Image: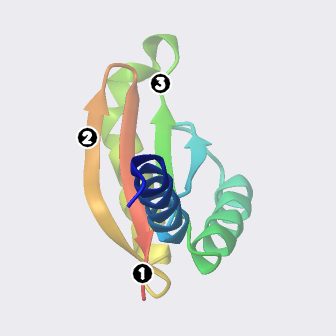
Amino acid sequence: MDYKKFLYQQKKKQKEIKAKTAKVVVKEIRLGPNTDDHDFNFKLSHAKKFLADGAKVKVDVFFRGRSIIYKDKGEYILLRFAQELEEVGKVESLPKLEGKRMIMIITPKK
């Protein structure tokens, strides 16, 4: 057997395996600690669409300046967001504060 032919076939197999793997898409939605109901519902409809398409949704609340003192408001918004998306997605990671952002990841239900 020719060694170059062997290498070519191995490379071809690796390429096929790589093409068959599912690529995880993560969509991001940003909210503020004082997000109003209309804006919240608008972002919620986008998140439902993303989850229906099979993408993960990363929801984060961004605190600007002194608004960092409203951490409880941010957590409340994220938990409310998760509760609204309960029928189409499940929470992968609960809200956690990283610097000036509070982040939560939601994955689609099968």
Q: What element carries label 1?
A: loop
Which label sits in the foreground, 2 or 3? 2
Residue 87 image offset from top left, x and y in percent = 46, 88
- Using the image as rendered, state which of residue 13 and residue 91 is in the foreground: 13
**Which residue is identified by label 2?**
96
Tag shown at residue 63: 3
Identity of the amino acid at label 3? Phe
In this rendering, the answer to whether 92 lies above or below 8 is below
Q: In this view, does 72 lie to the left or right of 51?
A: left
- Give the percent coordinates (x, y) of residue 8: 50, 53
Callout 1 touching callout 2 (CB < 8 Å): no
Secondary structure of the residue carrying tag 3 is loop
Residue 82 higher or lower than 59, as above or below: below
Residue 63 appears at what percent x and percent y? 47, 24
Q: Report the residue at 36% width, 60% height from top.
A: 79
Amino acid tagged 2: Lys
Residue in front for this viewpoint, 103 or 16: 16
Residue that badge 1 annotates: 86
Which amino acid does the dot numbered 1 rest on? Glu
Which is more N-terminal, label 3 or label 1?
Answer: 3
Badge 1: how crowded within 10 Å, few (<14), some, or many (20+)? Answer: some
Q: Which residue is drawn at 26% across and 56% down?
A: 93
Image quarter of residue 99? top left
Calculate the distance from the C-alpha at mark 1 to the C-alpha at mark 3: 25 Å
In primary-sequence order, the first of circles 2 and 3 is: 3
Q: Is the residue marked by circle 2 packed among few (<14), some (14-19), or many (20+) residues within 10 Å?
A: few
Disc 1 versus disc 2: distance between alpha carbons? Answer: 19 Å
